[in-house]
Image (cartoon, rainbow, N blue to C red):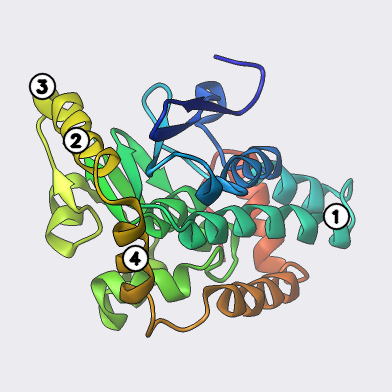
């Protein structure tokens, strides 16, 4: 593990962004989010043709900045600072979504909360049978955030999206593939070979044509950043509610929240 929560490996045509804090379940903290945004800045001006996101250890990306919620409830973090940290994680999701290059998430363990949103922001999601995905914002008494209210319905439809957000269900690999949350599901034994094959295809493709294809496919989608701004406004309002305090306190005490 490196000292940074995200490590960046660059070859001539592939950029690999690895969540590199397995002891903290590769959480998308504000610090990790800033590293990701920096790594993607100006990437279209390099020779890179695709970007891979992966997690070290058994988790892809297990949460957002949970410490910010805890500090906010315990009174050691002002609302403005808390909002800044949530904005940072949402900005990382938006930066992945806005990346002009093809993006791939390699998911071999849980992708949860903001980590699941980041996976959805990628063009393709390759998963192993050990993968799972869930959107557990309700765990903290918060409305959905990090762009999920726009990203999720596009993949699974509005009804299923609301079900997953209402329940916070951690969806197993097979059902996630059936729902379209995972683009491909590969056995553990062949996962790395399949991933390498896809990256080889993307990294040798026509760069301009792939970028234009991505732009055209996104043309009719509404603005993700506008949706994130609305989500953050709602989350900030709900952070003054007793349910937020109960959700965070229950998390710290490792019990089910009583809403």
Residue topped by disc 3: 189
Mark nearest the camera among 4 and 2 is 4
Residue topped by disc 2: 128
Q: Quadrant of residue 80?
A: bottom right
Pointers 3 and 1 in contact (CB under 8 A)?
no
Mark nearest the camera among 4 and 1 is 4
Is residue 241 visible in the rendered structure shown here?
A: yes
Residue topped by disc 1: 81
CA–CA distance between discs 3 and 1?
44 Å
Mark 1 Cα shell of 10 Å, populated few (<14), some (14-19), many (≥20): few
The reply, left or right, for residue 204 in relation to residue 140 is left
93 or 11: nearer the viewer: 11
Upstream in sequence: badge 2 or badge 1: 1
Pointers 2 and 1 in contact (CB under 8 A)?
no
Point out the image quarter for the C terminus: bottom right
Upstream in sequence: badge 4 or badge 1: 1
Local secondary structure at mark 3: helix
What number is the disc on residue 11?
none
Upstream in sequence: badge 4 or badge 2: 2
């Amino acid at each position: 593990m490196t000292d940074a929560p995200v490590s960046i490996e660059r070859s001539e045509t592939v950029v690999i962004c690895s969540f590199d804090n397995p002891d903290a379940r590769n959480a998308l903290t504000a610090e990790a989010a800033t590293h990701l945004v920096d790594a993607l800045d100006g990437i279209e001006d390099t020779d890179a043709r695709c970007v891979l996101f992966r997690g070290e250890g058994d988790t892809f990306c297990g949460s957002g900045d949970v410490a910010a919620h805890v500090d906010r409830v315990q009174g050691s973090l002002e609302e403005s600072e808390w909002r800044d940290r949530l904005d940072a994680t949402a900005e990382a999701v938006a930066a992945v979504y806005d990346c002009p290059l093809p993006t791939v998430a390699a998911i071999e363990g849980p992708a949860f909360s903001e980590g699941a949103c980041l996976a959805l922001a990628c063009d393709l999601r390759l998963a192993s049978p050990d993968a799972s995905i869930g959107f557990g914002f309700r765990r903290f008494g918060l409305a959905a955030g990090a762009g999920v209210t726009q990203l999720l319905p596009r993949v699974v439809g509005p009804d299923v999206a609301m079900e997953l957000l209402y329940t916070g269900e951690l969806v197993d690999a097979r059902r996630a593939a059936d729902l379209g949350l995972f683009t491909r599901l590969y056995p553990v034994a062949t996962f790395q070979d399949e991933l390498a094959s896809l990256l080889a295809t993307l990294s040798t493709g026509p760069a301009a044509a792939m970028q234009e294809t991505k732009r055209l496919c996104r043309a009719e989608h509404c603005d993700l950043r506008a949706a994130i701004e609305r989500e953050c406004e709602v989350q900030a309002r709900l952070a003054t509610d007793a349910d937020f305090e109960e959700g965070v306190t229950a998390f710290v005490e490792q019990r089910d929240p009583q809403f």
